[in-house]
Structure formats: C-alpha cells, structure tokens
Image: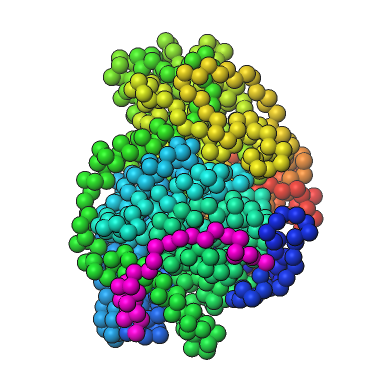
Amino acid sequence: MKYTENFRQIALVTASVFILTACAPAQSDVVTTEIDVSSSDVSVIHPEKWPEIITAALDPAVEARVDTILTKMTLEQKVGQVIQGDTNSLTPEDVKNYRLGSVLSGGNSAPGDKPYAGTQAWLDAADSYFEASLDPEGVEIAIPIIWGIDAVHGHTNLIGGIVFPHNIGLGAANDPDLIRRISEVTATELNISGHDWTFAPTLAVPQNDRWGRGYEGFSEDPEIVKSYGGMIVEGLQGELGSDGFMGPGKVISTAKHFLGDGGTENGVDQGDARISEEELRDIHLPGYETAIAAGAQSVMASFSSWQGQPMHGQKALMTDVLKGRMNFQGFVVGDWNGHALIPDCTATDCPQSLNAGLDMYMAPDSWKGLYESTLTHVKSGRIPMERLDDAVRRILRAKVNSGIFDKPKPSLRPLAGNEALLGSDEHRNIAREAVRKSMVLLKNNDGTLPLSPSANIHVVGAGADSITKLAGGWTLSWQGRDHVNSDFPNGESFLSALKREAEKAGGRVTFDASGETTPDGTDVIVAVYGEDPYAEFQGDRENVDFVPNDFDTDLLGTYKDAGLSVVSVFISGRPLWANPEINDSDAFVAAWLPGSEPAGITDLLFQTEADYDFTGRLSFSWPKLATQVHLNPHHEGYDPLFELGYGLSLNDTVSIASLSEESGVSADIGEKGVFFEKGMTTQPWRLAVNGSTVDLPFREGGVEVMAYDKSAQEDSLRLTFSDAESTFSIASGYPLDYAREANGAMELSFMSKSLSGPTTVQIGAGCIDLNGCDNFHAVALESDWSETRISLRCATKKGVDLQYMKNAFTVLGEPGLEMAVADVKLKQESSDSIRCD
C-alpha cells in the first residue's frame, strides 16, 4: 500500500493524451491515441494476447444470496460499500452513519497512541467497528464490515506477532510449500486480533534495485513470483473448493499491486512503467495468474502508471483484462488515495476510477468527501447504476465467500485472543526455517564457515542486537524504525541466539556494537551490519552503493590485518554494491531482512544439524558496480558480480578473489549533503531538542516534534513551541568537516511554512554548539511551502569553523511558533540565497 497525499505533484500525466506502446517492443508498434480512462473503446491493449485464467464457476447459492442482499440495500448503502476509510480518520459511529463497506489500518494506524497494539486493543476496536456496521437502525439489511491491514511478512502490527523474512529473502528460498505455511501462520495471527483481510501477497517483479520497496518483491524472475502467488492465496484463504476455504483461521487475500509496480522507470516509487505491453504481460503478470486461479478475493490497483496512465484509471487493464480475459470474480480495491492520481480527479472526487473498474476506493482520510461526491455522481448518472451494482456485487460476493455474514463479532470467533499461538513453537520454528532457507552465502574462502561454536567469537555491528534492524520496514510501524527489542516479546536478536548456541558448546561470545575494541583471545569476528529500516518512497535511492551507517566497516580490514577471521552478516532489502566489505570478509552472508528468528542464521553459521546448509540462491542479481541498478538477465548487457541463482553451499570450494573497489559512482557530495529527506535523517544526523536527541513523536517541555505530510505521508516535520524558548536542531553526536562544502559555494536549503499565520523565525545554519553560535538568520514564513537557502559562507564569515559542524539546521523556537519543515540538504549556491557578502 501507499501513504501519500499530494498525488497530483507526482503523477506523470498530461491532460488525457497518452502515448501507449503496443504488444511488441519494436518502434514501429508505438501507437499514439487519445484515451478516456472510463472507456476502453479506443485502446492499444490486446486482451486476446493475455492469458485466460480458468477460475471456479460462481456458486449459485452465493450469487442468490448476493441478489437478495442487493434488493434490500439503499443507494446510500451501496455507495458506502465502495468506500474504505482508515481507522485513524473515522469512528464506529461513522461506519454506521455512512454504511461503509470496510475499514483499514494503514502502516501507522492502530488503536491507542502507537502504530501497533496488543491483542485486546485490536479486538476491542474490531468489535466496535463490526457492531456499528450491523446496527439495524434505518436500514432493511445491515452489511458487516471487513477490516484490512498490511500483514506483508507476518502480522507485524500486533505485539507478539511473528516477523517473517521479507519477500526478497523468501524468494531466495525458492520454496512454494514454505510460503504456503508462512501464509497459514499469518492468517491465524490475523484472526487472533480480529482482522478479516490482509493486503498481501505483493506480486511485484522488481526490475530496478533503486526501488525502495524492492524487498517486497520475491524476485526479479517472474517464474519464482508465479510459483508463489497461488500458494500464498491458498495459505491465507484455504484451498479453493475445499471445506477449509475461507473457514476458521482464514482471511481474505489481496494480490497487489496491479500492474507493473516493479517496472517503473528508474525504480521510482509511484512512477511510470514505460514498457511495452509484452513486457508488462510477460514479466509483471505471472504472479496474478496463479493468485487468481487460487481464488484471490481482491486485487489492489497499483499506485504506478503504465505509459503515462495511472493504473487507478486503466479500464483496459482492470476491466477488459483482469475481470474479462482473466475471469477475476473478486473486487478491485484502490491504494491509499490512489484515485487522486487520475487527471481531473481529487482525493474526494473521482468517478473516473470507479467507471474504469475500481470497485472499492481506499480513501483513508478523504472518505467522507468521496462518499458525498460519489453519491452525487450516481444520482446524476455520471457513474452508471449498473457499474455501481457490479462493484457492490463483487464486494458482497467476497464477503459472503468469507463467511463474514455468519460470523459473530471478532472477539467471539474461534481463534480470537489466543495469544499462546503467537509465540508457539510451531510458528517460531516455521519462521526459523524460513530464515535458514533464505540465507545466501556469497563468499566462504578457505572454508571459514561453519564456525566452531566452542570458539571465542567477538560480535560487532549494531545489527547484532537489534531486532528492528533485522526486521526492516512494515514492522510495528510503517517505516519500521526506532523500536526496541522488548517490543518483540516472541522474538530475539541475533546476539541472543548466537550466545545461546555458543555457550551450549562451551564457546565465548563478546559484543561491541562499535567494533572499536577486540578482546584478547578472539578467534573470529562476526559483523552484523547493513541498511537501516525503510519502506516505500523513503527507500528509493540514486544508486545501490552501500553507505555504512551505524558501524565503521573500515574496521573489517583492521581485524584481518590482525590475523582474525571475519564473517559478515549483511542486512539489506536489496542487493547492494559492497565490494570493500566483501574483500575484507572471509565469509559474506546475504541475510536480507530475516525478522524475529535469527537463530536460523546461527543454525547455518554453526551448522547445528548435519543436514543444515546454505540452500538460498539469489533471486535478484548482485551488482558489479553501484550504478548497475537495472540488472536483469533479459536486459541487454547483463553483467552482474553474482548472477541470478548464485549461492554457495558449505562444501563448495569456490574462492572469491579480491574485487574491484571502484563503485562507478562519481565523486560528489552524495549522502553527506542530505540531512533530512523523505521524513528521515541520514546517518549520523538525528533530531534534537535543546541539544538532546529525540525520536518521533516528541512532546515534552512545551515542545512538540511530530511527523507531518508535505508531498507524502510523514515526509516532513511539524514543530510546535508553546511554553518557553527552546531549540530544535538536526544534530550529530560528533563534529563533521564541512569546510570544503563552504569553500565550494554550497548552501543549506530547506522547505518550510508557518502553520499559525505569517511570522518570522530565527534559523541557524552550521554550528558547533548552540550556545554562543551567532549564525542565525531571520526567515519569513508564510502559509504556503517555500524554499529558503542560506549560504554556508555566512557561517565562515561569522567565525564558525565548519571543520567541526555538529548542528546542520537549527530553529530558535518561541512560544506560539508552529511551523513545518522538509528537505533539509545542501545545494549549489544560487542567486536567491541568504548571503553574507
């Protein structure tokens, strides 16, 4: 799913004219045509060239029940069924009054003041919404609501839920039966908390590794994705046609994001797939073939576009291909306000999307306005009654199939509240098996692995004792950051698992996250490091160069020089150029994002059972250069460091020679010049109030620092000062040298606006310490976003030594100031910056 608001700034569309590429990729097949998103009369899509799926015949008893329900529904009820709102923006009373068809909890939505909650809190909320939907007041028939949530690698917004490896790791396992069993566990845990519906599986086939949600894809190989699609649906819903289909412990599945989200140009999230119809069909469709054949009850439209036309308005694909050629009998749900991407649409008004084939709008915070406009459009005939009835029929069909009409409230269902299942040995063992099978051994020179558990092992890297780092995004919260190990009562850290196994064999394990100290007698270094958690657009990158963040990987070479063996456990959501780290490691394991059961890693490092071995094989090609972001076997010039399907076993004697350490990335300011972007700071920069580091949300001493929405959800900050003068800053725990940037005519750029009327605020740029720093400038804030630039030369002219900068950006807050700030970074000096000439 997606979490953005200002979609019209992102949409790559102009008016209603689109250039669409026909079936073959040859230039002669390019056709220019004018498309009306609500009509497929003129289209270059060729449905007859898409696969025809043989799906189960409609159940006459189900259809008869749907017919009866439809005859009893008011127009207002029908419109309510096609609207979905987020639980952060609507109440149970709203569900009753507007007769909404479903609710969702987005990545940061949960009962209470956190983005995640415990079992009872979820159940209490589920009961409230469900009972509100069944209130009979004013209607002949009340329609039960269904509650959806993103359980994409386990039910990870539930305290105690099992956190499975992200899809990129599961793709490396290449084990469809394992995928089915994981999905069964996820469905069980969703039932424990009272949820009816998960927005999974993700069936994207990522083709560009810069994409920030690439780890949600199983593979760049469509055959692996195809082998998984149907198995996940079966695990979540039960086997189609069996007595267990949609029975106790099962949930509605969602195949997403239809279609081509993994093929956008430059790997841009919410971008445009400028590819031929042939590539769209042959690379990006296969997972949907098996998912639909297995009876997926819903499909989610993609945020992305194809050849300039947003998917939420693609009638040729949603109606002619998906519902027509592929015989999909379920309903198409939108993504987070994704209908607003369509030209001439807004989040609160978009008949074009429903007419194109969308059946349920996902309108998290815009649901009320969208309900009202949709009702108006049906009454006027702009949305034909036949189209509305078809959408409602599809939603009701899924609800009847799910058994929701015959179920009691969530807390009274068979598995509700059974927390013992969350941490059961069965569930944890499946997760541990999944970790074991997803590890890919890239290097094992001189048979470094397996390790002797009786050895003296020194563990380094912050990833070793952080479940959060191993779990990645979509874990407890949308971006998955800043959680502590105690938030995972049914999980453990890598360090904990390693110590347990080593101590059983009489070994010694020591730990230093920084890696700066090495105890005497150490035999081997195990370093756990890699990417920090991210999700969606915040994870988009310019290249795939691994930039060390919380651990100085130059230390790896120091350990080797001291005669120590080095084993790297590399945590990442995509293949990254890490040649220096691979060179300085005797063994290098691509661990991906393994989740809450890292004992699966130690099983292999120690080979705790004779039949345990590295069986994971790359489901994504590994780059030879950091600029190889579009690296797939069917692309011209395919030349990876490690090809698709590569992976070593413990008995292999392959020796990896020293690799080139030329990344291919031009030397520029890069990440060093970015302090805050896409809602997060870059290492080593952190948010601080009065000099002390804070995490979001922060409310203390009359200062609030909260996430705010500019162009996307939580991509900026809201600063509120109510009691006394305070300072907010983007600060580092140690000084950094930016003298070169000042000499190079760089300036601090940031976007800001006032949230309480026009005002002036004092902004500091580049200080060692806040006390006595004279480099503040008066910046006028208006009610609209505007860019301010402050030349770094101002700091040097005022005597600030930028060789020791610790505060990149500072706000001197006064009572009553409420402002928003975004995109704090260095840019080349321009004519409109604040200067000190």
Residue 697 appears in view: no
Residue 53 falls inside the magenta stretch: yes
Point out the residue furthest to the bottom here. 380
Camera-nearest residue between 691 and 49: 49
- Residue at (77, 41) in percent of width and height: 744
Residue 509 falls inside the magenta stretch: no
* 317 horizontally vs 454: left or right: right
Q: In the rendered image of this protein, does residue 804 appear above or below residue 757?
A: above
Camera-nearest residue between 784 and 270: 270
Image coords of residue 376 (percent x, y): 49, 86
- Residue at (26, 42) in percent of width and height: 423
- Residue at (39, 54) in percent of width and height: 233
Image coords of residue 793 (percent x, y): 74, 45
Tell me which corner region of the image, top left, top right, bottom left or bottom right, holds residue 238.
bottom left
* 802 horizontally vs 362: left or right: right
The number of callouts visible is: 0
Image coords of residue 20 (percent x, y): 70, 64
Q: In the rendered image of this protein, does residue 111 appear above or below residue 658?
A: below
Tell me which corner region of the image, top left, top right, bottom left or bottom right, holds residue 548.
top right
Q: In the rendered image of this protein, does residue 400 appear above or below residue 795?
A: below
Residue 289 appears in view: yes
**Which color scheme does this rendered protein use?**
rainbow
Looking at the rendering, the stretch of residues picked out in magenta corresponds to 44-71
- Residue at (39, 71) in percent of width and height: 395
Q: In the rendered image of this protein, does residue 540 appear above or below residue 355?
A: above
Image coords of residue 261 (percent x, y): 57, 55
